[in-house]
Amino acid sequence: MTLADAPLAALAKVVASPASRVALVIGNERYRHNPLHNAANDARGMAALLTQAGFTVDLKVDATLAQMASAIDALGQAAARPDVGTVLFFYAGHAAQLDWRNYLLPVDGNVEAASDILRQCVDLGTLLRRLERARGKTKLIILDACRDDPFGPRFRPVQKGMSQYDAPAGTLLAFATAPGRVALEMAGSVNGRYTESLLRELSVRGVRIDDALKRVRLSVRLASNGTQVPWESTSLESDVYLFPAPRLSEIELEQQARDELAAWNRIKASPKPKLADWVDYLKRYPNGKFAEVAQVRMRNLMASSEATPRPALPGHAPALQLGPGLAVPQRLKGSGNPNSAGTYPFRPVWTAGDEYLFHELDLYSGVRQRSYRIVVSGVDAANNQVEFADGSLSDLTGAPLKEGRYRHYDVPIQLNPAELQVGRRWASRFSQSGGGPSGVGEYDFRISERQAVKVPAGEFSAFRIEGIGSFIGRHLRLTRWLVPGLNVALRQEVRQTVRTRVLVSAKQAVSG
């Protein structure tokens, strides 16, 4: 079946195999008042790629409201069929947000007021709710739809770009740029910057779609000097490939791990790693064991040239004090968006004199076993180290390098993500020696939800991070709760030792 032969209604009738895949691709550019130049080419290029990958594709160029609604209805019917396993929706064109909802603009839309958006545009939530009924399916939504002034001079939404929306179960949402930001068209080019990178990275055989999107984000961020940073939200439970993945033996997987560690050690051994070093690592290992650390280091090097607003840092006076009886600052509470828990860069900024008091409890009885204080004694930014009064060391992301004066992490545990966002996943491979068993271990981490957590220091809106791993034959299970702007975990549970620690008080001189 060719693209030309695939009418929209055919999506609801496809019966190819238990792993059938269907896609709806829309590219709108011939708008009455603010036409685009790349959207149709973006859609055609994506439709061609998906056809190569075995999708049955319905391609719509310059679709009206009625055509978009009908196409989405047909996609929903196809998604419900038992023979269909993967559903993909791609849209290039104008879009806008209103009251935390996102709307896609058909070519016959004539928006002159906010009320027109509700009647003349397609609510993205309608598509998501329709696909959400197809339980157990893989759903991929890709939107290259963040141009400025979507309705021209007649009406300008209060909020630019698109609103953040957390992906429903079994879904991946990918946006051309971060929530509330806009992306300009590429004058004189065949494709837009985002779709151009998408087509290149998704066409690579045997690459997970998550890894491809991470490479897209890196490529677009660098090409735009930080003015456009693609964004994703995912709740996928398994790896997804457009093209079949190679099957690697245990020996090949172990060799990959050694190669990655060698690449990391070369960067770490450099007296002053350059931006290109981190970029090269992330291109080769977008989901590598050190990818979160590499993203933080790259972001810090790019900070001076990027247009992304940075929070103002206070002076030397304490900016954050927490403890029993003290009010929790509003910025440590939650987001007003009913559709999303939000996305926050996790960038600890350590200062000598920061201190945190914890109670350590029995995990099941809640009985206090001891209390201890963590005090920052020094920060060596040049060597990526934070020094603590008890002799412990961590890197600037909070990954432990040494616990106390004896236990060392020759390869540190990548505990913290570069960003706090529900659905984010990352992996860590660590090497431990001294002060107990020695050996190599691994963790897989996932941010499962954002929830209210009450500890002696107060009640917070925290991101719950679940880690499952192994170390010299032992199963590991670690759960941590992180709050944007607080350098340490609010609460931490270690199942194998049946212990939990909770924050009692904090004095943090500088908060990121």
Image: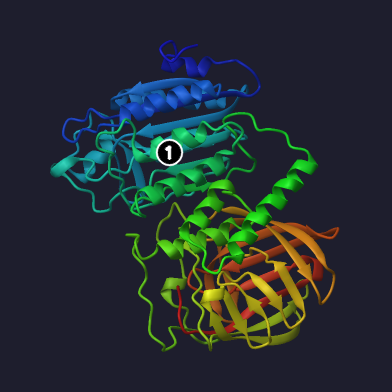
Task: Classify 10 Å Cα crowding around label 1: few (below 14), some (14-19), many (20 and above).
Answer: many
The foreground one among 420 and 255 is 255
Mark 1 sits on what residue? 197
Name the image colouring.
rainbow
Residue 423 visible in the current orientation: no
Quadrant in the picture for residue 261: bottom right
In percent of width and height, residue 179 lies at: 38, 52
Quadrant in the picture for residue 15: top right
Left or right of 148, for residue 273? right
Q: Amino acid at mark 1?
A: Ser
Q: Residue furthest left?
A: 154
* Residue at (39% x, 35% y) in the render: 196
The foreground one among 424 and 439 is 439
Quadrant in the picture for residue 399: bottom right
The foreground one among 503 and 66 is 503
* Residue at (17% x, 41% y) in the render: 152
In percent of width and height, residue 80 lies at: 56, 26
* Residue at (51% x, 68% y) in the render: 272
* Residue at (48% x, 14% y) in the render: 10
In percent of width and height, residue 224 lies at: 34, 50
Left or right of 277, for residue 125? left
In percent of width and height, residue 19 lies at: 63, 24
Above-or-below relation of 70 to 437: above
Q: Quadrant of the C terminus?
A: bottom left
Q: Does dot 1 land on a helix, a strand or a loop?
A: helix
Above-or-below relation of 295 to 68: below
Residue 505 visible in the current orientation: yes
Question: How many numbered discs sit on the rendered protein?
Answer: 1
